Amino acid sequence: MINLFRSSGLVLLLLYATFNVLNIIYFHMSNVMVGYMLAAMAVMYFMQRIVTAGINGFTVYQSEVIGFGLIFLTFCTVVAQKIFYGTYIGFDGIDTLANISTILFISTLWFLIGGYASTYNTKESLPVAIVIVGALALALGLGASDNLTVDYFEIMEESGVASVSHLVLERHVILLLAFAYAMSSSSRFVVLLGGVLVLLLMGGRSALFIFVVTAILMNLRGKMVKNMLVMGVLGMVVFIGARFLVSEGIVDVQSSEVREILFLDGLNADASFNARIGLMQDGFVDLPDQFLIGNFALTAERQGHSGGYIHNLLSAWQFYGFFVFVAIVLSLVYCFRRMQLCMKHRSSPIDVFGAFMLIYVIINVILAKNVAWNLLWFVLGLWLLKPPLKLHRPHTRNSRNRTRVRRQA
């Protein structure tokens, strides 16, 4: 039973991600089912915890205290906002206080799902990795337009959904690509090359470039010289392949989608980049008034809608206040330290997957993603609720009837 629980968490999450990729591009089913799937996986974390406690005794780990302390602190700030502040409804019709509560609820679900996935235990499998990347490339390729990126406008017309973009697909695609990377130590560079193709088809610029940077950082450890040489060869392959596609007219460099994803007009001419800079400058003005418990209504009122937050981790200050912002930063540092210790002593697929996701998330929240981003809370749950690393040490038997807090890696 315990082995089943340990293996089921990440498997169910990957099935969920696969379903969502297909659903967004092809099926267009109701989001209600997706919500139920998330809630079910979060509940499974507690079931897994109960089963483990029944076998090994109930033990509370230091990282768990930190993780649930973070959730509790964030919950308290939202309650305080409801008591002391009024809400704001912009032209998008979104109630800011109600939206903050919803964001916290969904973030908590992803936090618990991260904990549920953290006990995954299996061996590497290159065929599994190749199947995942190949299936993703096929699914996105069949849904691509003439410019070799997914046609989101066509999807919106067919599905009737108001907003579908690469941002909706990203978290599901990245989860699958990170798992494929973790399952293929002998041929990870082939998987990475396939991942680059998948992200080009998806059309997400930040996802593509941060994925590549994450892969480079992951390969700085171990046989660094060999890895960097292989990465250089793969870079040349990508460059030559891109030149071929352009020269043969397969990719139209005059297309707005292609020019945007490759920044062909320069960073200063990029509308998205300039908008993010403007939102950050506007957001700084209200940070002093949002110091204690946050007050996103100020930001929404300044912008006239709920989408005007700072597009990095400073948004946590806007949403929940300075202390939650600092708590999240310290939690990420703690997770990074746990990851380093874990990778130093072992590198199982779940450890490599967790390391890849953590680095990807940290870069993203520094540059591009806000505090409501699902993958941020998933990674926090993955590393804070992850059972402690069991190093080789004399075995001591603990009483099942005793609850204790253990300091761990």
Image: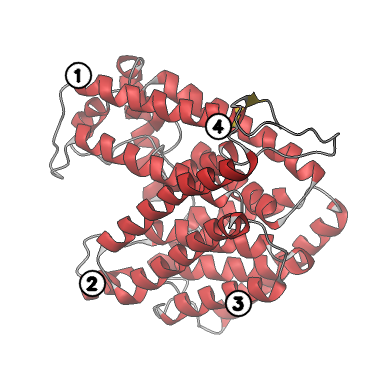
Q: Secondary structure at mark 3?
A: helix
Residue 124 left/right relative to 222: left
Q: Residue at x 46, y 33 (%)?
A: 313
User: From the viewer's perspective, is residue 179 above or below residue 266?
Assistant: below
Q: Amino acid at mark 4?
A: Glu
Spatial CA distance of label 3 from label 4 is 35 Å
Spatial CA distance of label 3 from label 1 is 51 Å
C-beta proximity under 8 Å, tags 3 and 2? no
Spatial CA distance of label 4 from label 2 is 41 Å
* Of labels 1 and 4, the one closer to you: 4
Residue 99 numbered mark, or none: none
Q: Is residue 268 visible?
A: no
Residue count near mark 3 (Cα–Cα under 10 Å), binned few <14, some 14–19, many ≥20: few
User: From the viewer's perspective, is residue 127 above or below residue 393?
Assistant: below
Residue 148 left/right relative to 404: left
Q: Amino acid at mark 3?
A: Val
Residue count near mark 2 (Cα–Cα under 10 Å), binned few <14, some 14–19, many ≥20: some
* The N terminus, quarter of image: bottom right
Residue 299 occupies quadrant: top left
Q: Earlier along the polypeptide chain: callout 4 or callout 2? A: 4
Q: Which residue is mark 1?
A: 83
Residue 54 occupies quadrant: top right
Q: Amino acid at mark 1?
A: Ile
Question: In the depicted view, which residue is nearer to us: 95 or 83?
Answer: 83
Q: Which residue is mark 4?
A: 64
